Image (cartoon, rainbow, N blue to C red):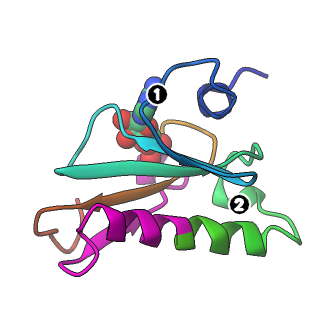
Amino acid sequence: MDCLFCRIALKQTPAKLIYEDDECVAFEDIAPQAPVHFLVIPRKHIPTTLDLKDGDEALIGHLYRVAGRIAEDKKIAGRGFRLVMNTNPEAGQSVYHMHLHVLGGRRMHWPPG
Ligand code: AMP
């Protein structure tokens, strides 16, 4: 199995890493859709939200906590930011390794496109 985000987590493919720990890695999105746009991914290869298993709950909670801490570091937390996890084609998922988008630094629109 060849997965781009697994390779980034293993540092086999370069990316602008922001944060890493035993469970997850965060890096800048290569095609930012907002002044701040980074991704938080589990090291574990989980293709989509639908592939979560019993026992993955804490991992997903951890991704959210890391996202919030980085948003604070980047000074976008108080203004507001958006967390997005696209699932399957109609939602626009293009990389099948779960990832939390963190977008901020501008006003977000609702409903999303
Ligand atoms: P999604 O379309 O929700 O699956 O999101 C995938 C995201 O990964 C997109 O926002 C891409 O811009 C981003 N992306 C793809 N390749 C890379 C890469 N090599 N480094 C950083 N971000 C990437």
Distance from mark 1 CB to nearest ligand 1 atom below 8 Å: yes
Identity of the amino acid at label 2?
A: Leu
Does the magenta portion include 100? no
Residue 42 percent coordinates (x, y): 67, 51
Q: Write down the residue under mark 1.
A: 15
Residue stretch in magenta: 66-93
Position of residue 31 relative to residue 78, above or below, is above
Q: Quadrant of residue 112?
A: bottom left
Q: Residue furthest bottom?
A: 78
Residue 98 percent coordinates (x, y): 61, 50
Q: Quadrant of the C terminus?
A: bottom left
Q: What residue lies at 16% left-to-right and 61% top-to-bottom?
A: 105
Q: Residue furthest right?
A: 54
Residue 48 percent coordinates (x, y): 65, 52
Question: How busy is the neighbourhood of tag 2: few (under 14 within 10 Å), some, or many (20 plus)?
Answer: few
Q: Residue furthest front?
A: 73
Q: Calculate the distance from the C-alpha at mark 2 to the C-alpha at mark 1.
A: 26 Å
Q: How many numbered callouts?
A: 2
Q: Quadrant of the N terminus?
A: top right
Q: Is residue 74 left or right of residue 47?
A: left
Q: Which mark is residue 31?
A: none
Does the magenta portion include 74? yes
- Camera-near label (2 vs 1) is 1
Q: Is residue 15 left or right of residue 77?
A: right
Q: What residue lies at 38% left-to-right and 49% top-to-bottom?
A: 38
Q: What residue lies at 24% left-to-right and 68% top-to-bottom?
A: 75
Identity of the amino acid at label 1?
A: Ala
Q: Nearer the viewer, residue 4 or 66?
A: 66
> Of callouts 2 and 1, which one flags the residue occurring earlier in the amino acid sequence?
1
Q: Write down the residue under mark 2.
A: 50
Query: Callout 2: helix, strand or loop?
Result: helix
Question: How busy is the neighbourhood of tag 1: few (under 14 within 10 Å), some, or many (20 plus)?
Answer: some
